[in-house]
Image (cartoon, coloured by chain):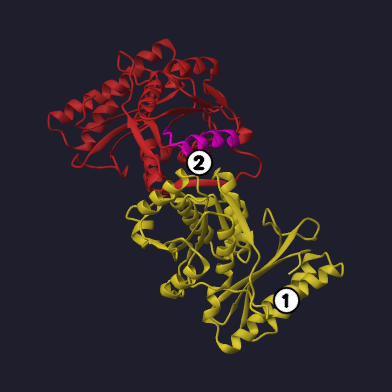
Chain colours: A red, B yellow
Amino acid sequence: MEIIKTVRDMQNFSESLRLRGKRIAFVPTMGYFHNGHLELMKEGKKRSDCLVTSIYVNPTQFGPGEDLDKYPRDFERDERLSRDVGVDVIFYPPNSQMYPENYQTYVNVENVTDNLCGLTRPVHFRGVATVCAKLFNIVKPHVTIFGRKDFQQLVVIKRMVTDLNMDIEVVGMPTVRESDGLAMSSRNAYLKEDERESALSLSRSLRLAGSLYDQGQCDAGVIIKKVKDFIGKHPGTRIDYVKICDVETMKDVERLERKSVLALAVWVGAPRLIDNYVFGENK
Amino acid sequence: MEIIKTVRDMQNFSESLRLRGKRIAFVPTMGYFHNGHLELMKEGKKRSDCLVTSIYVNPTQFGPGEDLDKYPRDFERDERLSRDVGVDVIFYPPNSQMYPENYQTYVNVENVTDNLCGLTRPVHFRGVATVCAKLFNIVKPHVTIFGRKDFQQLVVIKRMVTDLNMDIEVVGMPTVRESDGLAMSSRNAYLKEDERESALSLSRSLRLAGSLYDQGQCDAGVIIKKVKDFIGKHPGTRIDYVKICDVETMKDVERLERKSVLALAVWVGAPRLIDNYVFGENK
C-alpha cells in the first residue's frame, strides 16, 4: 500500500495506471474509519484493479462554528484498516496541497442543495462538491463509491458528475449500522453513554415511518409529525430537520407518490447525526 | 475529419486515443472562425497527435439582452476551414447535449472575475468556466489553447484549471490582428463601414498607452485618461471600461510596478469589442 501526499504524485500514479488500461476505484473519506467506510472500500476493491481512498478533513465543507477542529482523526488506525481491506493507495494531502494561497474556485450544485442540510449548513455542499471535483481530477477514477447515509450528498455528487460530464460511475452503498440500528458515523465517537441510547431514536423513528407507510399512510405531514414526536421524547435530542423529499429533486413532497426519502438531522448532545429511509425499500 | 455531436461519442473517442498513448489538443470555440481561431488550431496541431475543436455558442455565458441570438454562425465555412488547418475532430453538440433538463451545476471562479468584464457582464465568466469544465471533461485534452485577446477569460481558465486540479496544460496565444491593427473577432462582422474606422481607435489607443509607458509614464490614472480621451474622439464609440490591472489577480493597479495589462471594452455601434495590451511586451 502506498501513501501519496501530493497532487502531482497522485495524478502521475493514476495516469500511468490508466495508460496501462487499469481500472481505478476511489473512496473519498474524511478518515476515522468505521465499517461503513470499509464496506465502500470492499465494494471498490471488487470493481477495480486499483483501489484508492483519500483521507482529508475538508475545511470548505464546514461552516463557522461547526466541528472542523474537533473532527476525530486517527491516521495510524485508518492506515492499518486500509491495509487490511486491500486499499492500494491512500491519498493523504495536507491543506497546502488542496487549497494553496489564492485558491478561489468553487463548484455549486444548485437546486438539490436548496433543502435539508443545504438549508441549515449553507456552505456545506459547495465545499463537498468542490473537494470532490478536485479529488476526481487528482485521482482520475473510473468509479467512485459513496455511502447512502449521506443521502443528499450522494444526490449532489451524482448531479455534479452528470452536469459537468465527468466520465465517472458513481455508486451508492447502503448505510451500515451497529447491531442496535445506529447508523455508523465518525461523529458517533462524540456520543456520551446516555446520549448513545437517545441516538437510537433516529433509526427507530425511521422504522416507525416505514411501518406507517407499509400500513398505507401516504401523508408526509402525518409521518413527519409522528417521527418528530417520537424523537422528541428522548432526552438530549434536538431536531434540526425531519423531511420527506423526492429522491431526485430533494424537494419536499406532501404525499408519498413518487419515490421519496425521509431524511433527518438531529443533535444528540454535541454531535449532529443524520439518517434516512427510502420508502418502500427493505432495511 | 470527424464531426461528433454527442458527449458519449466524444468521450469514447478521446478515451480510446488516451489509452493508445496519444496526445490530445483542444481548442474550444463559438465558431465563425477567423485567423485568430486558426492560429490556435495550428498551435494545437503542433502540440498533439490529435486536434479537437469544439463549436458551441454557449448560452450560459450570455446575459439577458446580450447578443446570443444574433451571434454569427456559419458551420459549413467553419467545417471547411477546420479541414484545411488539419483539425481531426469537430465536437459540435446541440444544447440538449450540453444543458439537458434539470441542469443545475456551475463553476465559479471568484476573485479574478470581480473586475473588467466580470463587472459589466455578471454571469459571463460563470458560464465560461462552467462550459469549459464540461468541455474538458468531454474532450479529455492534454493541452488546451486559448487566445490572449480575451485576456481575463484566459486568467479565469488558468485559475480554474489550477484550483480544480485539472491535469491539463493551458496555453495562451497572442492576439491576431488585421493588417490595420484591429484585433480579430467574430463580432467584427457586425461593424458597419464607418464603425470599422472608429474601431481602429482601440488598438491605436493601446499603442498610445504602450508608448507612454515606454517614455516612463507609470501612473495608471494618467494613461487611462489619455486612452479614454483618444477613443472618445471617435464617432460611434461608447466605452464600457478602460482599466489597468495586475495580470494575475486582475485587480486595478495605481502604478505600473508589477506586470500589468491595459484592458478595454468599447461598444462601436452595436458590437462590444475588447482588446488589451500587456505593458513591456512587444506587439
The residue nearer to you, when weighing A197 against A69, is: A69
Query: Which residue position is annotated with label 1?
Result: B205
- Judge whether residue A8 is colored magenta: yes
Separation of marks 2 and 1 at Cα, in angstroms = 42 Å
Residue at point 50%, 48% (across, down):
B22
- Residue B223: image x %, image y %? 78, 70
Q: Residues within 10 Å of mark 2 (few under 14, many from 20)?
A: many
The chain under label 2 reads A
- Judged from the image, the secondary structure of the residue bearing numbered disc 1 is helix
The residue nearer to you, when weighing A192 against A109, is: A109
Answer yes or no: is residue B45 visible. yes
- Judged from the image, the secondary structure of the residue bearing numbered disc 2 is helix
The residue nearer to you, when weighing A133 against A14, is: A14
Left or right: residue B223 compared with residue B68: right
The answer to whether marks 2 and 1 sit on the same chain is no
Query: Which residue position is annotated with label 2?
Result: A137
Quadrant position of residue A185: top left
Q: Which residues are magenta?
A: A7-24
Q: Three-letter amino acid code at disc 2?
A: Asn
Classified by dominant secondary structure, the portion drawn in magenta counts as helix
Quarter containing the C terminus of chain A: top left
Q: Three-letter amino acid code at disc 1?
A: Ser
Query: Total marks drawn?
Result: 2
- Residue B29: image x %, image y %? 50, 64
Q: Residues within 10 Å of mark 1 (few under 14, many from 20)?
A: many
